[in-house]
Image (tube, rainbow, N blue to C red):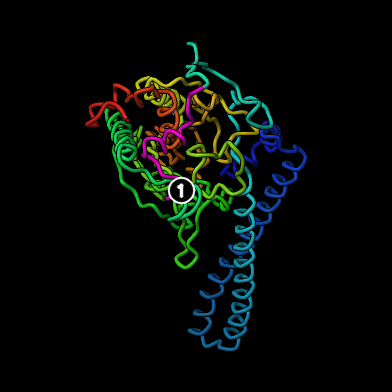
Amino acid sequence: MITLNRIISDPDLIAKALTKRGLDENKVKEKLFSLIDLDKKRKETQIKSEELKSKVKLLSSEIGNLYKSGKADEANKLKTEVAESKTKMQSFDEENKKIKAQIEELLLTIPNIPHDSVPAGKNEEDNEIVKDWEKKLPDMGNDALPHWDLAKKYNIIDFELGAFITGSGFPLFRGKGSKLKRALINFFLDEAEKAGYEEVRPPLMVNEDSARGTGQLPDKEGQMYYMEKDNLYLIPTAEVPLTNMFRDKIVSVKDFPIKITGYTPCFRREAGSYGSDVKGLNRVHQFDKVEIVQISHPDKSYQLLDEMVQHVENLLKKLELPYRILRLCGGDLGFTSALTYDFEVYSAAQKKWLEVSSVSNFESFQANRLKLRFKDEDGKTRLAHTLNGSALALARIVAALLENNQTPEGILIPEVLKRYLNFEIIN
């Protein structure tokens, strides 16, 4: 979340910046100035409480001296005054606690400030293409099969059986389809390791503090699977547990950049998603993904963002998939992100682009929620920057690989994956 000090320093500038997200500037200002007023009230009650604490301390000392001097009546009067002061002090402390909770609640509703390079816009139609596929897009002809038909033809993904076992959006991979997924996971993890990321296998469920720390709560509460009895959430992305490894931590500036990668299944309710764009693997409730996360010095985070974008781009090049890179506009930007690049691959049979990765810089937004800090060289404690990216999400990658590599003889395996498999064609 945005720090309160930043809001106090220039609420007008922040309100103006948030209009890139399509928010009403006057309504944002109203919320920001409410926060400033609450903070003033908090400081006033704090001062009153501290004044009473000083008074109680002074009177308590006098009471002891009065008792020693045999002036019990005067001492008892002061004891009554001390008791009354403590009651008032408790009242101020309780009021202060309520105000802090109000401030926290309001701060959690304010999205991150978009980076200067983020284009203004309302939705995905206003996203900016920063790199487009320069070669001719693959044309598989009118007889090309979409991946759901290919999956059935070669018995590698069973959507109906997955729906029978669990429900729609939970595909069952089998045979060469399952091995292809495993090969992709190993390939992505190996490439991340080469790039200096430490591999971690995190828990698949997180508690409320972890979900709030990375911004899934309260913004994406309806998109997560929730286990009410245990008050735990199935992770929508490995970003959540990987970044929370550093919650409430002060890391060393010498450790930057901290680079973590992890493979996990991901679970998303995707409530309200209907239509042809959700068919097959286009949108599912459970999918596999390799995530890369970096904890960075604030001065280096945008350089590292560029490096992460390059990393994802290299993966797609090695898979020989047509891709393009988009800079998300303000209206399509995630709640916690300051700048996000999306990667899309071309699905030849469907003749459409499918999003397969988002690479984002959250600046200090998540770190402030997480209380993730570092000591600078001058000894000052500062908030770190956090970044993450999909490297990559498997469901749509598999869809594009199947469609783009289909031949009359079967589905050809990309060269880079052959060393992970004992076959070169799915037939």
Q: Is residue 353 left or right of residue 308?
A: right
Q: Is residue 325 left or right of residue 258?
A: right
Q: Nearer the viewer, residue 177 or 189?
A: 177
Measuring 24% from the left and 29% from the top, which residue is drawn there?
A: 423
Measuring 68% from the left and 52% from the top, which residue is drawn there?
A: 40
Outermost residue, top direction?
Answer: 135
Above or below residue 135? Residue 232 is: below
Q: Is residue 258 left or right of residue 355?
A: left
- First to last magenta residue range: 143-161
Above or below residue 27? Residue 204 is: below
Above or below residue 65? Residue 353 is: above
152 magenta-colored = yes
Q: Nearer the viewer, residue 369 or 152?
A: 152
Q: Nearer the viewer, residue 38 or 233?
A: 233
- Badge 1: few (under 14), some or many (20 or more) residues near its Cα, within 10 Å? some
Residue 157 locus on image (x, y percent)? 39, 41
Outermost residue, right direction?
Answer: 26
- Quadrant for residue 401, please give it: top left
Q: Where does the N terminus fall, quadrant-wise?
A: top right
Looking at the rendered structure, the kind of residue marked 1 is Glu
147 magenta-colored = yes
